[in-house]
Amino acid sequence: MRGVLVIYTAVLFLFFSLVFSLVRISKITADIDVQREKLQRLSFQVKERKNRLEAFKTLIEKEGIKLYDRKRALEVLLTEVDGLRKDFQLEVSGDLRSENGFWTMDVQLTFKPSSSAHLRRVFERFSYMKAPIVKINSFILVSEEEGPEATLDLTFFMPFSEHSE
Amino acid sequence: MGKVACVSYSLQGGRAVFLRRIRGGFVFEKAVDEKPNPEVLKNCEPFLSLFYPDLISEKVESPPVDDPETLEALLKKKITQITGATTEYMICYEEIGDESGEEQKVYRVFAVPSEVYSGDEFVNSLGREKVSIFTVSQFSPSGISRFVDPDKVIFHIYMDLEKLIMTVSEGENILYSRSLAVPSYVSETGNYSDFLLENTNMTYVYVAQRQGIKVDLILVSGKAKDEEVFVKNLLELTSKGIASPLPPPQVKNLSVHTFHYYLPALGTLFLSEAHDFSPLEVKERRRFVVMSSRVSIVAGFFSVALLILLLLKIFSVLGETREIRSLKDQVNRELVRLIKDPVVAGGEYSYYYNYLNKLYAVRKGNPLNILPESAELIKSVKATKYALAEQGGRIKLAIEIDRYFKNIVDMNVFAEELKAKLSSIEKRGIKVNVGNVVKDLKKFNLKMTVVLEKPI
């Protein structure tokens, strides 16, 4: 009788152990599902970042912009500004500043445009410059008796990287 | 399926039938014409019926009691009062439904002294719980009668060389039972018919008249069925149907001869628990074991299903774990590649980001962006001053006109043409302001300021 009861108890114990195991494993499965979902989301985010980075690099390549350190950037800026003295009457209208990773310089150019084609060339020269970037603040063209006179107020922004020093 | 041993025995001897359980019944294996050794029964389910001639049978009244233990104690006390003896009894009982009321119940109680049970060699040797039923051989014929017709009141007469049993039953209920040992003079003379007739006649009359039991059918079994004179006389006396039972359909491979010879042993197998004299706690323990076995079978069945389910789940979890590990590795690899990228790793990202942002902002806010819309105007007006600037998120072009004309017509034509051009510019989303207009009609001079505003 005792032996039989031991067997019955063992069967019941087995049954409840199995039920318990199933409940545990169901919880584990649920946890795994959550983990997988998180990982898939993370994987998606990583891929998205990667794509964005690739697009960013493509853009850098397309724009042809380069990395300058602080010193080199200043050299480029000053050379560029100096180079303008050949073609324009140049007046530096503000201090040379270093702001948010840019060397910044305000310049006023005065010149007498010979034709509208000359004007267009000047505009194009400044509009498409990338190192330094040239912001045209204002342009004034006055017709004088001896011919038209143009004044350009420009701000030069020359980027530099602190890391590459 | 297990083995079953049905034993009918007395102090002098006994008979045993061994069966094997099959689905829906039993298969006869062997019969032994002696009291078997208790050791032989250890591997069987034993159904025991003791021939105890001094069985007490009484109708006892009792108030309704729900608790079976209390009821049994009450009935035992009443039996002791009736017999007047100091012996302790073991009882089995049935409620007589026809005679019971709501306030008073009537029970048919059968009793044997406790020492019959406690001193029984089978019970002691096998263990109380191991014994499936412990009853008296007087009840056993009713186990067969119920298969002949469960709805009829059957007067069953069984006789062997040792004893005569007469049991009146209806289905599972035993209504009356009487037994007596075959006297030695009958065995010596072999005149069983007279002995049978005398006793059955007397009992039948007692049952019919004193107990008021209406008998539907008489069954004759064992040695009694071979006594033709007796059967013939009984038929005349009772004018009732008389029959001899056949082996019950539940038992296979059993010959009619063996069936009749071992009838009390076989009948024991088909008695209900109500005719078991085992103590209440033994019955409860037995019920618990039966219930446990059923629960265990169901639990075992489900365990197999659960085990399969568990294994499937484990395999699926293993698979998923592998999948997650590979996904994790892949994400890690991509993340490392991303972090190690020169643009990110060298801290150049923010440099290029700021550079490009500044470049695009400057391009967007370039005051020259207003020229495509205003080029035609600029060419035609021949103004004295043009001023271009970006101001408050807008590009502004101010044109100062100071022109002399040959005549008033030219001046008006110019003014009209200018108006048309400005209107066309306005349609392209450019805000146009014309101010300080001075017309000198004598000198044909026109002065004005035109301001164009374009949102960035």
Image: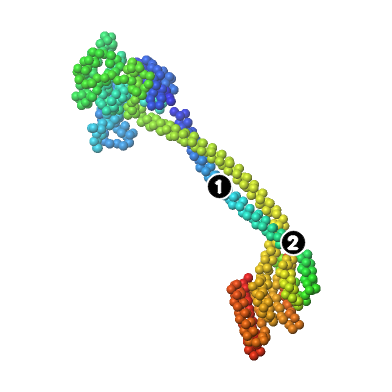
Establish if B137 lies above or below B73: above
Q: Foreground: B63 or B29?
A: B29
Q: Local crowd at mark 2 within 10 Å, few (<14), some, or many (≥20)?
A: some
- Residue B72 drawn at (x, y percent): 31, 32
Residue depicted at 78% across the width and 72% down the height:
A84
Establish if B227 lies above or below A140: above
Residue type indicated by callout 2: Leu
Residue type indicated by callout 1: Asp
Q: Foreground: B273 or B23?
A: B23
Label 2 residue SS: loop
Residue depicted at 21% across the width and 15% down the height:
B233
Residue depicted at 74% across the width and 66% down the height:
A131
Instruction: Tell me the residue that label 2 is attached to.
Output: A67
The CA span between labels 1 and 2 is 45 Å
Q: Are marks 1 and 2 on the same chain?
A: yes
First of labels 1, 2 by sequence position: 1
Residue depicted at 67% across the width and 73% down the height:
B371
